[in-house]
Image (cartoon, rainbow, N blue to C red):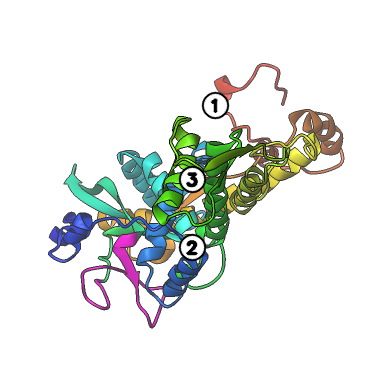
Amino acid sequence: MKKIRRLQTQGEGPRMLALEPQMNLTHGLTPKRLRGILELADQGDILEQHLLFADMEDRCEHLAAEMGKRKRALLTLDWEILPGRANDARAARIAAAVREQFDAVNGFEDLLMDLADGIGHGFSACEIEWDYRYGLHLPAAFHFRPQSWFQVLREDRNQLRLRNGKPDGEELWPFGWIVHTHRSRSGWLPRCGLFRTVAWAYLIRSYALEANIRYVQVHGLPFRLGKYPPGSREEDRRALYNALRTLGQDAAGIIPQGMDILFETPASSSQDLAGALISRCELGMSKAILGGTLTSQSDGAASTNALGRVHDRVRRDLTISDAMQIASTLSRQLLAPLAVLNCGVSDPRLLPWFRFDTREAEDIATFAQALPALASVMKISARWAHDKLKIPEAENENDILGAWRA
């Protein structure tokens, strides 16, 4: 067990990853440059793609806010650890033991957010720091590792490796990692991240934002036009041009004798083209991330309560999809190691599995009116009614509400 108690990233090759300077790929980003980065990722070189994705989320407040909504929706869900086989006493004991071990692990909410980072990137990797205490192998900490620390095999781009300076990288240690692959779209691992879709809207938004800043700098200033007589020297024309620029900043300047400066009032316009383009790009980001726009912002025109509920329903569907994918990863890469190391499980059918409770409670008033009438003509399971309404069954007679009748 010595091997899994060490961190793989402390090895001679991988430990240099933390010392690498982080490139800023969003500065001066152009359509040609973005296309080149994505094409490199398609060929198996994912380094620049994930550096770009991380920088996008750092620099775009709208993107960070929308991704935060989608990730944090997972924190609102209840969860449970279920036996690998129903009606199996040993499977139930293993699930109970793993649940007890799981409760001793700190930082589960942080782990959940780190794994959800794979929604945008396509994958997320957390290194497990194991500890041996109370006679059990338990995770002491989960260390998030940036996606730029990894590479894929060129012959199989779904195989993730740790970068160590060698062409094929270093294979990840068994039981040493939780690697969540999130399928926001189909394709090879480098193509399945949601940020592949958002990157183009981000690029256009950055162009529009830069244009908007330039507009703000000159908004309200008159157009300045310099006139110089024929035969003026180059240095005189340059002096006139510098004077025009100085007037826009300091409202003061000097020009050679014989030259004129004219102030022209620009035509007024109520259109904010750059602002409209920024809003359009942000709406596109919201559609890609949350499935709609009415849960993000309201334009006052198409916003209705009914449409808002529809968009919220779509957002709920995305949360369910995210929860199912992350639950599968936790079952295979966290619960399974706990069961194998501490319970000696060798039969995969006995391995417990993780489940988020994504069920929604039915309307209690509707059920209260319908169930008494239906119960007189149908054999309705009490457990089914409890599950539908998400009301737990009483543990004993003293725990039952007084209004209940047998």
Pair 2/3: label in front: 2
* Residue on which the image places disc 1: 396
Locate residue 69: give its quadrant: top right
Precedes in sequence: disc 1 or disc 2: 2
Task: For the N terminus, give its image quadrant.
Answer: bottom left
Relative horizontal placement of residue 102, taking residue 400 as reference (left or right)? left
Q: From the viewer's perspective, is residue 44 above or below residue 385? A: below
The stretch drawn in magenta includes residue 151: yes
User: Label 2, label 3: how many angstroms apart (C-alpha)?
Assistant: 16 Å
Q: Nearer the viewer, residue 255 or 75?
A: 255
Precedes in sequence: disc 3 or disc 1: 3
Residue 92 visible in image: no
**Residue at screen point 37% across, 58% down:** 51
**Residue at screen point 48% across, 35% down:** 247
Q: Which dot marks residue 30?
A: 2
Q: Which dot marks residue 60?
A: 3
Q: Amino acid at mark 2?
A: Thr
Precedes in sequence: disc 2 or disc 3: 2
Residue 132 position within the rendered picture, expressed as x and y whole percent measured from the top left: 17, 48
Task: For the C terminus, give its image quadrant.
Answer: top right
Local SS, label 1: loop
Magenta residues, as a range?
148-170
